[in-house]
Each structure stands twice: as structure tokens, then as C-alpha cells.
Image (tube, rainbow, N blue to C red):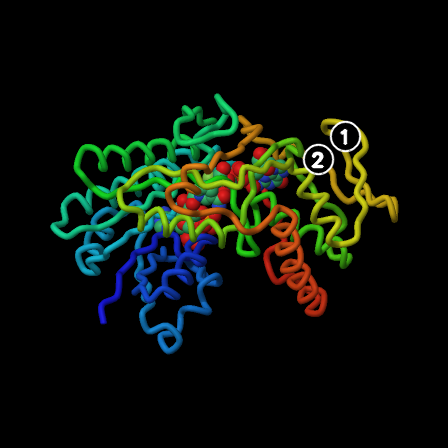
């Protein structure tokens, strides 16, 4: 029996873990790339990491900054498909570590593309491009023809990787596609992205484990979808008859404030907003308790105010569309973090680090 073989960089991350599940369910042999860490970083894939349950799942050590190792791995595995999901993926952090962000996100893609160009077997390459490339948007909604206007080192690094991918497609005939994915979330989202910060924060607040949730720009508008729906689009992009670029989005927008309200509703909070700017507060009308405050420490040097995707091309050519609504997403995440907070309550100590993230 012949399996398709796929390499996934970023397998320990949110999307990598869902994509691994999807590919394994389709009978793929999956080779996940893991970077060395001093503590375990495989929490999201530990359930797959048993050779008994999934004999076709393998892990290999690799860092995206290490071209020779990536090249060696590709030669050894001889994959049919490579999904480059690995990245320094936090926009706020990218202002603190711009050079590292460029090295991982832009050079990482180049390392893969060069290695593929030098092989004599066919490989399909997927690059995890981002709506953050649209930055301060020049048109709304954004589709595959909207010009980029990145506002952060992260956005710039992704623009560089996007054009490298396109250049290896047009110049060297590599099957190399970009998925331009808008924000997508899940219970596996990193703790310092705004949705997860809100779902864990409000769950802890409900159980008395945290007095207040401090956030940055409440007015930011995002097009939020569910990661599990989006990895299905990623797979379809790679199966498409030719390599191309695709926007993947819901087309629906909400503010950060609205995400707080949706999660608040799940917990039975009735949140009203008082004040403006730095003095704005979210108050639970039922108890008169202030539960959300604005903290400028979470503002970014440049902000991306609004992202709204137009995924008509993906719908038409890939037959893909999102299944999960905004309020379902908020509830799925809120429920999962309530369970986590309840565990913390019982244990009397945090299950995940309570350190105050500076982003
Ligand atoms: P994530 O949860 O932050 O996962 C990032 C992954 O990259 C992790 O597995 C991380 O490993 C790995 N990584 C970081 N630096 C690395 C390095 N130097 N070498 C090798 N691996 C490294 O991100 P995600 O939300 O799953 O997103 C997946 C990809 O899609 C990223 O490229 C992201 O930029 C892009 N994207 C995401 C969204 C979104 O809304 N989620 C939207 C558009 C594009 P550790 O676990 O060891 O940290
Ligand atoms: O959740 P965020 O950090 O996501 P952001 O910056 O939109 O980036 C995510 O989506 C991109 C796709 O567009 C991906 F490419 C990228 O890898 C990442 O997955 O912030 C969302 C919005 C921002 O406007 C931010 O300023 O929420 C605002 N925000 C308000 N308070 C906050 C906070 N963001 C964070 N992280 N923490 C806050 O306290």
C-alpha cells in the first residue's frame, strides 16, 4: 500500500497539530518537524505521538534557520508534500525580535524552496501566508489581488516568503502555493493571542482565579475563523490541479470588544462598556464588577486596524467554505478554557503559566 508522505513544519503549533490529525485520517505518513526545547513543546500532538495508535507518524528535530538539516530531511523522507507552517507567528513579539522573525519566517521558506529546487522528485510546497501582509489595508474586503501594505516585521517577513514562493513557482516550476489565511483560532491557540487570552482570562475570572482582564486595542477588527476548518482549506490548496494563491477567510468581521462580549455571554456576564480610550472599562452589569481594562502595554508600534477576507476564489475553485460561526467559535474556546480553569481551581494552582505576557 502506498502512502502519501507529508512533512509539516510547525507541527507543535495550533495549525500543525490539526493538520497532522487531518493528514493521518487520510492515510498519510506524516513527518513532523520539532525544534529542540528545554521543556516539552509537544502538548498539542502528544495524543498522536504514540507509534501504536499512529504507526505512520514520525517526529524529527529541525529548526527553520538550519538549511542543511532541512535539505537532509527532504532527501531522506522524499515527501510528496511539504507544509511550511513553522513561524515566529506573534505580530506583537515581532517588533521585539525583528531579525529573528525575518530569519525564521522568510529564510525558513527560502530554505525549503531551495531544497525542493535541488531535488529530482516532485514535491508540492505550501507556504503559510497571512492576512497580516495586507496590513493597513488598501481595499476592503481583501482578496488575492489586493496590494500588500505590511505594518510589522512579521507582516514583512510573510510578504517576503509569499513572493519567494511565487517566484519559485513561476521561475523554477516548483509546485508552490500560498494560503493567505485570515485569523483563525481554537482551544489550541497560543495563550498570548487575543482570543485565547480572553477565553482563559474570563474563565479564570468567573472562578475567582483572576481579578481582571487587561487588553490593548479593543477596536481592532478581525475576520476570525476556526483553525480546524482552515486546515481543510490548506490541504485542498495543495491538492488543487495547479499551484496558486488563495485567500481563506469567513468574510465576517468583529471587534476585539465583540469577542469579549461573546465569551462573556457564554459565562452569563452582561458586559457594558464605560469610558473611552485608556479609561474604557468592561463592567459586568449584574455584579457591577469591572472585568476588563485597557493597558497600553499591549498596544503595538503600528496597528492593523481591520482585516476582512474575500474567499470567493477558494470557494469556487476548492469547494471550501468555513463551517464554524463566530459565536460557535467563541463558545468552543470558552468551554474548553472553563474546563481548564476548573482544573486549576481544583488543583489550587495554574495549569498553564500565569505570567503576565507583555504582548
Ligand atoms: P503557532 O501556534 O504559533 O505555531 C508556530 C509553530 O512554528 C510552532 O510549532 C513553533 O514551534 C514553530 N516554530 C517557531 N519557530 C521555529 C523555528 N525557528 N524552527 C522551527 N519551528 C519553529 O502558529 P499557528 O497559529 O499554528 O500558525 C501556523 C502558521 O500559519 C504560522 O506560519 C503563522 O504565521 C501562519 N498564520 C497563522 C494565522 C492564524 O491566525 N493562526 C493566520 C495566518 C497565517 P514551538 O511549538 O516549538 O514554538
Ligand atoms: O490575536 P492577535 O495577537 O493576532 P494578530 O496580530 O491579528 O495576528 C494573528 O493573525 C495573523 C493573521 O492576520 C497571523 F498571521 C498571525 O500569525 C497571528 O496568528 O491580535 C489581534 C488584534 C490585534 O489588533 C491586537 O492589537 O487584537 C489586538 N489586541 C488587543 N489586545 C491584542 C490584545 N492582541 C494581543 N495579542 N494581546 C492583547 O492583549
Apparent side of residue 31 relative to residue 72 in the rendered image (left or right): right
Q: Nearer the viewer, residue 350 or 178?
A: 178
The answer to whether marks 2 and 1 mark residues whose Cβ atoms lie closer than 8 Å is yes
- Image x and y of residue 261, in percent: 72, 43
User: Badge 1 is on which residue?
Assistant: 279
Residue 189 at what x, y percent from top left?
53, 51
Q: Residue furthest left?
A: 120
Task: Name, please, the residue furthest toward the right.
Answer: 287
Counting from the top left corner in percent of width and height, residue 258 is at 69, 39
Q: Earlier in the sequence, mark 2 or mark 1?
A: 1
Please rate how many residues cluster around mark 1, counting C-alpha atoms within 10 Å: few if below 14, some from 14 to 19, many from 20. Answer: few
Between residue 41 and residue 110, name the one nearer to us.
110
- Residue drawn 70% across the image and 55% down it: 203
The tag on residue 294 is 2
Check disc 1 and report its element: helix, strand or loop: helix
Q: Which quarter shows the C terminus?
A: top right
Q: Is residue 21 visible?
A: yes
Amino acid at each position: 500500500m502506498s502512502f502519501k508522505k507529508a512533512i509539516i513544519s510547525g507541527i507543535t503549533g495550533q495549525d500543525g497539530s490539526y493538520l497532522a490529525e487531518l493528514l493521518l485520517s487520510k492515510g498519510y505518513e506524516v513527518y513532523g518537524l520539532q525544534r529542540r526545547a528545554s521543556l516539552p513543546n509537544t502538548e498539542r500532538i502528544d495524543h498522536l505521538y504514540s507509534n501504536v495508535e499512529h504507526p505512520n507518524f514520525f517526529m524529527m528535530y529541525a529548526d527553520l534557520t538550519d538549511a542543511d538539516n532541512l535539505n537532509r530531511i527532504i532527501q531522506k523522507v522524499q515527501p510528496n508534500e511539504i507544509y511550511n507552517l513553522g513561524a515566529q507567528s506573534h505580530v506583537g513579539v515581532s517588533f521585539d525580535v525583528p531579525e529573528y522573525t525575518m530569519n525564521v519566517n522568510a529564510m525558513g521558506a527560502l530554505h525549503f524552496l531551495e531544497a525542493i529546487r535541488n531535488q529530482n522528485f516532485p514535491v508540492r510546497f505550501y507556504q503559510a501566508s497571512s492576512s497580516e501582509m495586507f496590513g493597513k489595508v488598501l481595499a476592503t474586503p481583501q482578496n488575492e489581488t489586493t496590494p500588500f501594505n505590511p505594518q510589522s516585521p512579521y507582516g514583512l517577513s510573510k510578504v517576503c516568503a509569499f513572493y519567494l514562493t511565487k517566484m519559485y513557482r513561476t521561475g523554477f516550476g516548483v509546485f508552490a502555493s500560498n494560503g493567505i489565511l485570515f485569523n483563525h483560532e481554537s482551544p489550541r491557540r497560543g495563550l498570548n493571542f487575543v482570543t485565547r487570552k480572553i477565553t482563559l482570562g474570563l474563565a479564570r475570572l468567573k472562578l475567582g482565579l483572576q481579578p481582571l482582564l487587561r487588553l490593548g486595542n479593543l477596536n481592532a477588527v478581525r475576520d476570525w475563523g476556526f483553525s480546524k476548518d482552515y486546515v481543510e482549506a490548506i490541504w485542498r490548496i495543495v491538492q488543487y490541479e495547479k499551484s496558486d494563491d488563495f485567500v481563506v477567510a469567513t468574510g465576517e468581521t468583529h471587534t476585539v470588544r465583540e469577542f469579549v462580549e461573546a465569551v462573556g455571554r457564554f459565562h452569563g456576564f452582561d458586559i457594558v462598556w464605560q469610558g473611552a480610550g485608556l479609561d474604557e472599562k468592561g463592567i459586568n452589569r449584574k455584579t457591577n464588577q469591572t472585568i476588563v481594562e485597557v493597558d497600553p502595554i499591549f498596544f503595538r508600534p503600528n496597528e492593523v486596524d481591520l482585516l476582512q477576507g474575500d474567499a470567493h476564489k477558494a470557494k469556487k475553485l476548492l469547494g471550501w467554505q468555513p463551517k464554524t460561526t463566530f459565536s460557535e467559535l467563541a463558545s468552543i474556546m470558552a468551554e474548553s478554557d472553563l474546563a481548564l480553569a476548573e482544573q486549576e481551581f481544583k488543583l489550587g494552582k495554574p495549569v498553564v503559566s500565569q505570567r503576565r505576557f507583555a504582548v
